[in-house]
Image: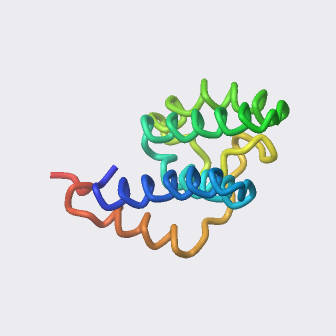
Amino acid sequence: MTPMLREHFSRELRAAAEAEARGELAAAWRFLERAHILSQAHAGPHLRVHGAMFAFAWRRRDWREWRGQWPRLLLAAPGSWTGRAPRGNTGGANVGIFTPMSIPEDLQEWLREAAASPSRRPR
């Protein structure tokens, strides 16, 4: 993950925590979904965001989401390593694990910038 993309990813996770602390649960979940989209190609961050989703579901006593995060926790890293994580998937139990989805324009721009970064080009 490039430093620029890591910063955007971290910002989304911070925004999720701040929104949850204010009681804005729908906004908190949207920030987690955005962080998920940014993390999909990177095993560690991908696993981290699923852990955050799992914990969010636990704190909210959302047992459907909590159960749905178990297989995602198991498949996140292998999906990233193999390139099988579906682009744009928001990561929640309300969508199929392998379902690709459209990516919001601002996130597309960040992902394009990360892909064009010199640190991502073959040497």
Quarter location, residue 113 = bottom left
Quarter location, residue 88 = bottom right
Q: Residue at x 65, y 51 (%)?
A: 20
Left or right, residue 96 beside residue 28? right
Q: Residue at x 42, y 53 (%)?
A: 10
Is 96 in front, or is 84? 96
Q: Is residue 43 above or below residue 28?
A: above
In this view of the protein, can residue 89 be seen by the observer? no
Residue 114: image location, x then y, percent? 35, 62
Q: Is residue 113 above or below residue 1?
A: below
Left or right, residue 5 beside residue 94? left
Which residue ends up furthest to the left in the rendered image? 123
Q: Is residue 59 above or below residue 30?
A: above
Left or right, residue 59 beside residue 36? right
Residue 80: image location, x then y, percent? 49, 38
Residue 116: image location, x then y, percent? 30, 66
Q: Residue at x 71, y 40 (%)?
A: 97
Which residue ends up furthest to the front in the rendered image? 22
Is 103 in front, or is 14? 14
Count of marks overlaid on the render: 0
In this view of the protein, can residue 46 be seen by the observer? yes
Quarter location, residue 85 = top right
Residue 71: image location, x then y, percent? 69, 26
Is 1 in front, or is 67? 67
